[in-house]
Amino acid sequence: MASMPPPRPKSRGSYNCGRCGLPKKGHVCAAGGPAPTPSPSSSSGAASGGGEDSKLRRALSFDEAGTPSSPEKKARVVGDGEREVGDMGRGGEGEVVVMNEEEGGLELGGRAVPREVLAEVLRRLGPRGVMAAAAVSRGWRDCASRVWRAAEELRLRAAGISLVGVLLPRCLALSRLALRMESDVDATMLACLSFSCPSLDTLEIVMSDNAVNRMTGEDLSRFVSEKHSLSVLKIGGCSNLGFLNLSSSSLSILWLSDLCSLSKSVINCPNMSEISLCFTAQNNDSTDLVMLMDGLGRTCPNLKNMHISSAQLSNEAVFALESANLRGLCMLSLILGSNITDAAVASIIRSCASLELLDLSGSSISDNGVGMICKAFPHTLSRLLLALCLNVTTCGIQFATAQLPLLQLMDCGMTLCASLQHEKQVPYFGEINGGIRFCPKLPTSKKQPIYQKLIIKHGNLKKLSLWGCSAIDALYLNCQELNDLNLNSCTNLHPERLLLQCPNLKNVHASGCHDMLIGAIRNQVLNEFAAAEPHLPCKRLADGSKRVQLPQFSQQEPSEDQKGVGLRRTQCTLHLD
């Protein structure tokens, strides 16, 4: 057996001086200064053979700007198989994204795009789109961060508090927040908003159909008292509050809906200018509206807009509003109060000096109350809503349009009804835009006469709602500025007794009308047959049997300017849905 050769001694190699390059063995360097210590980046660069220009970035470095020791531009190519941490994909295969960390530039597809421009594009996206863009690359993440930091308004549809808790801390300048909640909301949401949004100015929370608002009055009171910058608060689904005890010197607008049985109602907001309280349509609601009205006058002296929706509204509540001495009211809306009569109208006239909007829908006022309103506010009232006022007739409506020259909106939906005994006992309510909003039908003490004629001539009226007015047999409108007309469910309106002299009509709602009436409306507002008919005067024969045209009295041809005006006329839309 051959013997194994002795192991070869390990070769240590030769070491050279770092200053002059001569071998270190027995060498004393004459060059001065300390020897430089090789850095890991320089050694790796030498090992890779790239030289000084080839410097590798750390694998998990999230620094956006270059360090002072490496001021040169650094480029990164995103290939097909390379992804950032949390990357959700890119727009194209093999897209090249070059980031200039010194100048903050970003190149997409070979073209330089400033990050400010990309951030401006991302501002047009929704919150989820910005979150997806932040996962593309480091440059996109920086642009998304700029969007979050500069965001002042955020509208978000959230299924829980997790998404809200992730996004809000990124929005340092957020002042306006609108949430549509798809899941239940409780005090945890208010605590998250109070902590994450220190400078919140406007908050709006809307609940979806399946979501429940579990906030209590104590939670809401604590939140309002802690947010010293909050000026606008709108929350829906407030059926679990139990009581109201709000105190804030900054709150100016308060909207609360779906309230029910408030045991205490104290709103101490001296700077509040608008309040809207909508109660649920329940007969067992135990809220003391008289005390609420009286308290608003003492604690909110600067109120200008008030909206109260409750079936418990009565004359006593309106009398309490008169004692509150709110002379600065411009808009007053007291709806669904079937116990409000003409006596309440007299109280409103004594307490309000210059109303611009008055909504008494669902009340029991009569034509006398409408006359008092017209005599009290002839120079200020521009919007009058009398829907479901079953004691008002066409005489009151015509008097209102004749005595209110500044009137621009009038809602008389379901006011002129032929008979309520043969209709289905279902809740309904009409709106000016043709939609249907549901609320309980109110009892009436006066039966409307059938076959009424309504004649309205007005120079400023822009919107008119006659939804469900089945007692109207003839309608004549001469309104030059009218652009929205609601005739839904006008079942007894005769097609030959309809005259619409409204050249600026843009929308006509005729859902539920019979076909002959729809054809008459289409003929008048759309002018489908105007081009086919010759514009010649007509004269009946001696016996009155038929009309004959008189060509010798032909009308003068319109000028070119008049033709241009006719061509520029706004096209009207007939809504049948």
Image (spheres, helix red, strand yellow):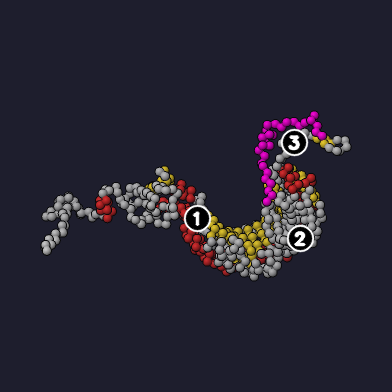
Tag 1 residue: 128
Mark carried by residue 533: 3
Percent x, y for residue 355?
70, 54
Taking the spot 16% from the left edge, 59% from the top edge, the residue there is 10
Percent x, y for residue 259?
64, 65
Q: Residues within 10 Å of mark 3 (few under 14, many from 20)?
A: few
Give the total of numbered labels.
3
Q: Give the range drawn in magenta.
A: 548-577
In this rendering, position of residue 490 left or right of residue 273? right
**Which three-letter amino acid code belongs to the residue tagged 1?**
Arg
Mark carried by residue 66: none
Q: How crowded is mark 2: few (under 14 residues within 10 Å), some or many (20 or more)?
A: many
**Which three-letter amino acid code belongs to the residue tagged 3?**
Glu
Tell whether position 537 is magenta. no
Quadrant of the frame with the N terminus: bottom left
Q: Label 2's element?
A: loop
What separation in Å lies between label 1 and label 3 (alpha carbons)? 57 Å
Whether 67 is drawn above or below 502: the answer is below
